[in-house]
Amino acid sequence: MLHNRIFLSLASLLVAAAACTPAHRLDIDLENPGAPVQPTMYGIFFEDINYAADGGLYAELVKNRSFEFPQDPLQGWKAFGKVEVRTDGPFDRCPHYVRLQDPGHPHKWSGLDNEGFFGIGVKEGEAYRFTVWARVPGSGTSELRIELVNTASMGEDQFVCQESLTVSGGDWKQYEVILRPSETLEKGVLRIFLVGDRRTVDLEHVSLFPTDTWMGHRNGLRRDLAQALADLHPGVFRFPGGCIVEGTDLDTRYNWKNTVGPVENRPINENRWEYTFPHRFFPDYFQSYGLGFFEFFQLAEEIGSEPLPILSCGLACQFQNETEEAHCPVDKLQPFIQDALDLIEFANGPATSTWGKVRADMGHPEPFGLKFIGIGNEQWDATYPEHLAPFVKAIRAAYPDIRIVGSSGPNSEGDQFDYLWPEMKRLGADLVDEHFYRPETWFLAQGARYDSYDREGPKVFAGEYACHGKGRKFNHFHASLLEAAFMTTIERNADIVHMATYAPLFAHVEGWQWRPDLIWYDNLRSMRTASWHVQQLYSQYKGSNVLTLKMNGANVTGAEGQDGLFASAVADGDKVYVKVINTSEKPQAVELAFGETAVRAVERVDFTSDLLLEDNTLDDPDRIKPVHRKWTGKGKAHKVQIPALCFSIFVITL
Ligand code: AHR
């Protein structure tokens, strides 16, 4: 049973340190630095689940902007007056558009309201760029009124900003107006209607973005959410999934080729999380692909991460398909293999190559410098190695330097896992992706997970993990603490663990299918969870080389007799970072011992909370966060106290 606790002040930590006996001595070997910690070690994994892309990171505010939702081209819209959906538009892969006509009476109106994603969130005084492709059939001019509207307003006017837009001529052109709302709205509506002489007008790809996007890109990302990624300093960026790579069926798998080129002509895709869980349906969940592979590569570059795209291996989601017919037969895999080869060309090829030119035309003539590619997500059984083998052969032949990531299936251990690891070794995968969404007991028992792994095999990519508390499958501090404890085995074994990414990354508070998640948001605000802080701390104190750390000659893995302690250490120039996690409900006295080396200074960071079963909230986003303590200690050994249920990092200056 976990209890609320009193947060200990630094003074009480020091006093209590003296009182607690005996201290657990952690011997840190400064003389023999071990394996380098890979720059890719702590990363992020993005999947469009929980409205992570449209309605989330992708800053587009209009839902179904191209009238392409399959069940109803006007899903997300309310049409009034005389509005017709037509299908011979200017973009061949997104052919739908709307025609607004004179409603036939001076006191009637023709137009459209868009509801956005759980409403349209706009902030008072900020600038929003409205764009639309339009024409006046035949010729002439047509006038539109563009508004952001508060439909719940009790004021005389519903609109919080209003602009006119004149469309002229019979050719399709893109038009733009800037809207500046006079009020902040969390759930605003975009309204467009015919005014003036109400001449017929055709509208396509209706879009609204804040001008203040991440890095100011026009087809940009929500600044606060991208900043939350940048602040993690991720070394690797895995995208775009997850199960959406596989699709509920192969037709709806993530198809990267549909996600590049002009946004107006990217065909939408069904999002498999639309109806994966019958207890959480989201009938309007599609992928606009506005956040596509170019944007992923660009973001990876901007936040300093190695991009790691994952592609379909020709197997549809194996959880959802039990018959062979659902999958692509091995002898018909060539188009899938070509997708992988073309992707490498898209990322790395010269601007004169077929796919390199697509990238260059999108504004990035320089290669993105792709080094890794993943083939398959959570696949299993003999069919996976059979499907993977021809990919490995083709990629090795064309791009011998590209490192290939294979999968160990959906489970952290067991038959499929035990079968796939040797298979990945046999096929020569460079890294193997492991997934574990597991309860507290599992995390507490895994402190030595990688200590005994094969040193000659592929490297480990802990590609999806999170502590799913038993009966507590939601974000809370205690789960994050156990993730921190588990991560000591990642750090200690940096010679074979080269990448690790928590999952999932994002969730909209009104649109989630899966939790816990790293970052939550509504239409205006966002919140970094306790798990986010754990990831951030590991990344910030990543170090360059592993140091051997022992307690009574053993690794500190939460093993029996170790009083719930987990620990690891790394060197970083003239600094050493010692991470100690006390998972017990008692404070623990610890002595940090550095052999004969005298250290010049010690500081500490403590991450703990008495809100064990709670997390930060949108209303109170900073209630659980690390506390950096300026504390100077000198000498060869340091007696410290680790409060109960606390993750402490000691920053040692040599
Ligand atoms: O992260 C959510 C899902 O969990 C991923 O799509 C899948 O790979 C795993 O099963």
Image (tube, rainbow, N blue to C red):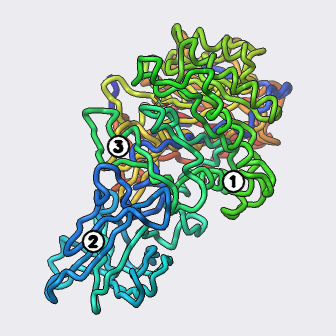
Kindly identify the residue that appears in the image at 67 percent across and 28 percent down.
405
> Disc 3 marks which amino acid?
Trp
Task: Give the alpha-carbon distance from disc 3 to disc 2, as whole Å.
Answer: 28 Å
Secondary element at tag 1 = helix
Q: Is mark 3 within 8 Å of ligand 1?
A: no
- For residue 465, above or below residue 141: above
| Residue 92 placement (x, y as % from top left) | 50, 59
Q: Amino acid at mark 2?
A: Leu
Ranked by sequence position, the earlier of labels 1 and 3 is: 1
To which residue does mark 1 refer? 301
146, 186: nearer the viewer: 146
- The label shown at residue 512 is 3
Q: Alpha-carbon distance for marks 2 and 1?
A: 38 Å
Q: Secondary structure at mark 3?
A: loop
Spot occupied by residue 171 in the image (x, y as percentages of width and height)? 49, 79
Callouts 3 and 2 close, C-beta under 8 Å:
no
